[in-house]
Every structure is written in structure tokens, then in C-alpha cells.
Image (cartoon, coloured by chain):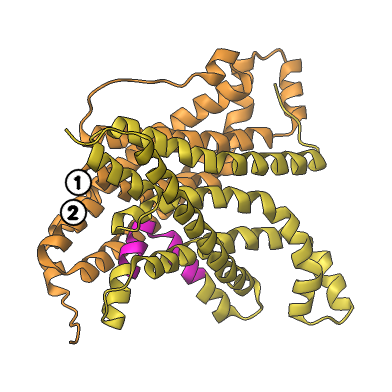
């Protein structure tokens, strides 16, 4: 028996795949924005906050839709990794900068806000970019809890048409395209935020 | 009602740990071989070879492991016209995946070695590979240990994805036990705890190693 590749089935279902890809992009982009906020707050809390804040882990018992649950899980996950990355950036700032700021009479929060965070994020921006893209890729796992993003749609199309290889092949290509797109977008943001304004 | 969650069910979960570990270890070994090649290809003088390695990394780091798993699993079946066992497909997918990541980690370590070391080795008229093998790699190896251990932790957790194509490791065992006992809120926390027990010692090792390097570089805390 010879296997004949049939990609035309895939093209017929392309709109559905793209719809899934759109949800993947929405979920990832939202999780990236929220996760970065969580990361900066946690990185500040971890290096400067009072002890209880350093340990605080919020536990919420709510009933969530699959998409919200996915978003929360992704945000928390990204927040945890990204806060470590941001912390590394904070620690990479020469200690003399903080001492100089303290000599000028700045308060802790002011030091963090005006002296530390901008160059810290700039230093670790490449690492953050990689983490963001990893997040987008790992969003494929949220299909397990029935959020209908690209992987979930691919799974259901593959099992209804029996063209598993073709569908997964094309979906992989879509993910690759999204990863490259996100990387281009994120370096555009880097350019806009860090290169243009030499304020810090 | 289904069965209750007792010692037998717990032992079933425990018995799945070896395959998780074996898969991680196998993928790490395969990945180390692939990764070493990739890392070296990324720094060789020949430009096409560098492009090849870069393309490989872009492809493998730009697509989800889940998709790589599906493509290898169904791809092997299509190529060899047989229904393959889950083992070779999973092992291949995870080896290729970790090869791309380890390759980048190790390239970074190699490039962290001062240029003068290469030049000094070249002055001794060592060939490119000998410079790499006797002078650069021993030094780069030391730098690369903490991030490599960190990646191993990630890999152990990522092997849970293999559950999706029916490979019975810890997560799949958890799914099976959930299906027979209908108690996901007992089974999955236990599974998570088992992963934690596997990964935490490794994370601690990575942290200690990293701190030692920080101390050697004289990095201070701000607050």
C-alpha cells in the first residue's frame, strides 16, 4: 500500500485553521502583556517587597470557561518564568547606580521605577522574547482543556478527515510562521521603546 | 462509581516514573549528540553549514513540541508504511527538540570564551577541531552546566506531552487512573507532586551552580 499525500483537504479547511491560529495569537498576546506585568511586580516583590509578599501565592476557586482558564494558566506560568528573567536583569545593574540614586534621596519605589526597571528589561529583552515565543508554542497544550485554538482545531479536523499527517504538517508550518511573526513584532517593539528614546 | 484511589493505584503511578525518567534521559542523550553537532556547526567558518544549523534551530524552536511529536509519530508511520510504536517516535521527537535547545545553550557558552583563547590555540598550530576539543570545550563546558541542568528540568516536565500520543509515562498513567477512579483532584496533584520530586533536586543543583558562578563574577544584591 502506498500513502498518497492529499493536501487539498487541508486547504478546504484552511479558514478554520486560521481561526484557530487567531485565537492562539490572541491568547498568547494577552498572556504576554499580563505576564510581563506579573513578572515586573513579582521581580520587584522578590527583591524589595516585605517578606509576606515574597511568599504570597494567590489561590482562587472560581469556575472559569476553558479560554479564561487557559489564559490564567498561561499568565501565571509566564509570570513565574519571566519574573526570574527580569530579576536577572535587575541584578545585572551595577550596584553603584542604586547607591547613587540613594545618595540623591530617592525612595525604593522611585529607584525601581526610574533607575532600575528600564535598563533591566532592556538587558534581558532577548531572553524575554524567547520566553514569550515559548509561551506561544506551549499554548498548543491548552487544547487539552478544550480551548479551541489551533491545535484543538487541527486535532478535530485530523480525526474527522483521517489526514493526520497533512493537517499536523500544515499546523506546524502555521506555528512556525506565527513564531517568526511574533519575533519580528517583538523586535519592532524593542526598537520603538528602547532604541528611539535614549531617556534612561 | 469507579474504583477508589488506593495503594494499588498509587503504585501504578509510581511504576510510570521509570518511563518518564528513561524518556528524559534518552532524549537528553540524543539531544546532547545533536546539540553538540548543532553548536559546532553554528560556529564553523563555513557559511552554508552555519545557515543549515541556524535553520534547524529556527525550525525546532519555532514550532511546538506537540506538533513535532505528531509530525514524527504520523510521519514515521507514513514514511515506513507501518504503525510505529510510540517509543521511537517520542524519543526521536524529543531528541531533535532538545538538540536544538542544547545546541543554542552550548553555542552561547562557546562564544563566552574569550577570543584570545582561540588565537592562542591557533598559535600552537592546532587545527580548528583540536582548538575546539582541547582548549575551548573544556572551558565552555564548565559555564554551560547550570543552564544545561535547567534545561533538563524543563525536558522532564515537557515529556508529559508524550501522553497525548498514548505513550504511557507519568502523565498518561495519571490520565488512566483518573479514568478508572473519577478522582482527578486526587490523581493530578499526586502526579504534579511526583514531577516536583523529580525536578526539585535538579533545580536546586542548578541554582547552587549558578550562585557559585555569580560569586566568582562578584555579582551583588541591590536591596
Q: Of residues A158 and B52, which is closer to you in this image?
A: A158
In the displayed structure, does residue A149 sit left or right of residue A141? left
Q: Quadrant of the N terminus of chain B?
A: top left
Q: Quadrant of residue A161?
A: bottom left
Residue found at the very far right of the displayed protein: B124
- The residue sitting at 17% across, 74% down in the picture is A7
Magenta segment includes A94 = no
Letter of the chain in orange: A
Question: Spatial distance from mark 1 to mark 2, Cα to Cα?
Answer: 6 Å
The secondary structure that dominates the magenta segment is helix
- Subunit of mark 1? A
Tell me the magenta residue range.
Answer: B54-72
Q: Residue at x 76, y 73 (%)?
A: B133
Find residue A4 and report its horizontal and vertical position in percent. 17, 82
Which corner quadrant of the image does residue B168 belong to? bottom left
Residue B88: percent from the left, percent from the top?
40, 70
Give the residue at x 25% y 47%: A143
The residue tagged 2 is: A153
Given residues B136 and A186, the one toward you in this image is B136
In which chain is the residue bearing label 2?
A: A
In the image, is residue B71 above or below residue A140?
below
Q: Which residue is mark 1?
A: A148
Most foreground residue, A130 or A186: A130
The answer to whether residue A200 of the structure is visible from this angle is no
Q: Quadrant of residue B112?
A: bottom right
Tint of chain B? yellow
Q: In the image, is B120 to the left or to the right of A57? A: right
SS of the residue at dot 1?
loop
Q: Is residue B65 above or below residue A148?
A: below
Q: Give the quadrant of the C terminus of chain B.
A: top right
Residue B118 in sight? yes
Amino acid at each position: 500500500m502506498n500513502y498518497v499525500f492529499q493536501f487539498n483537504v487541508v486547504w478546504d479547511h484552511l479558514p478554520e485553521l486560521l481561526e484557530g491560529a487567531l485565537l492562539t495569537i490572541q491568547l498568547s498576546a494577552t498572556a504576554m502583556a499580563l505576564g510581563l506585568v506579573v513578572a515586573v511586580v513579582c521581580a520587584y516583590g522578590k527583591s524589595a517587597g516585605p517578606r509576606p509578599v515574597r511568599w504570597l501565592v494567590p489561590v482562587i476557586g472560581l469556575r472559569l470557561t476553558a479560554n479564561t482558564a487557559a489564559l490564567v494558566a498561561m499568565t501565571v506560568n509566564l509570570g513565574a518564568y519571566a519574573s526570574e528573567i527580569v530579576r536577572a536583569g535587575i541584578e545585572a545593574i551595577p550596584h553603584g547606580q542604586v547607591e547613587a540614586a540613594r545618595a540623591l534621596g530617592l525612595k525604593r519605589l522611585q529607584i525601581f521605577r526610574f533607575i532600575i526597571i528600564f535598563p533591566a528589561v532592556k538587558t534581558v529583552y532577548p531572553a524575554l522574547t524567547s520566553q514569550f515565543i515559548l509561551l506561544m508554542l506551549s499554548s498548543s497544550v491548552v487544547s487539552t482543556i478544550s480551548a479551541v485554538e489551533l491545535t484543538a482545531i487541527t486535532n478535530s479536523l485530523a480525526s474527522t478527515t483521517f489526514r493526520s499527517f497533512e493537517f499536523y504538517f500544515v499546523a506546524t508550518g502555521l506555528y512556525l510562521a506565527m513564531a517568526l511573526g511574533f519575533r519580528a513584532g517583538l523586535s519592532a517593539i524593542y526598537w520603538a521603546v528602547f532604541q528611539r528614546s535614549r531617556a534612561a | 462509581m469507579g474504583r477508589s484511589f488506593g495503594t494499588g493505584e498509587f503504585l501504578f503511578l509510581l511504576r510510570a516514573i521509570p518511563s518518564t525518567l528513561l524518556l528524559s534521559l534518552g532524549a537528553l542523550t540524543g539531544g546532547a549528540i545533536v546539540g553538540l553537532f548543532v553548536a559546532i556547526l553554528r560556529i564553523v567558518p563555513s557559511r552554508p553549514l552555519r545557515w543549515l544549523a541556524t535553520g534547524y534551530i529556527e525550525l525546532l524552536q519555532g514550532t511546538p513540541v506537540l506538533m513535532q511529536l505528531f509530525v514524527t509519530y504520523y510521519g514515521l508511520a507514513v514514511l515506513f508504511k507501518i504503525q510505529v510504536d510510540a517509543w521511537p517516535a517520542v524519543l526521536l521527537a524529543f531528541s531533535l527538540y532538545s538538540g536544538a535547545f542544547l545546541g543554542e545553550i552550548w553555542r552561547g557558552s562557546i562564544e563566552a570564551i574569550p577570543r584570545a583563547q582561540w588565537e592562542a590555540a591557533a598559535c600552537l598550530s592546532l587545527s580548528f577541531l583540536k582548538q575546539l576539543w582541547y582548549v575551548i570545550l573544556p572551558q565552555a563546558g564548565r559555564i554551560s552546566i547550570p543552564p544545561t541542568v535547567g534545561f533538563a528540568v524543563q525536558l522532564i516536565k515537557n515529556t508529559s506531552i508524550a501522553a497525548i500520543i498514548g505513550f504511557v509515562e507519568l502523565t498518561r498513567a495519571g490520565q488512566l487512573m483518573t479514568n478508572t477512579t473519577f478522582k482527578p483532584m486526587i490523581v493530578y496533584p499526586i502526579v504534579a507532586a511526583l514531577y516536583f520530586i523529580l525536578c526539585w533536586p535538579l533545580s536546586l543543583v542548578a541554582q547552587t551552580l549558578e550562585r557559585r558562578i555569580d560569586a566568582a563574577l562578584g555579582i551583588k544584591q541591590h536591596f
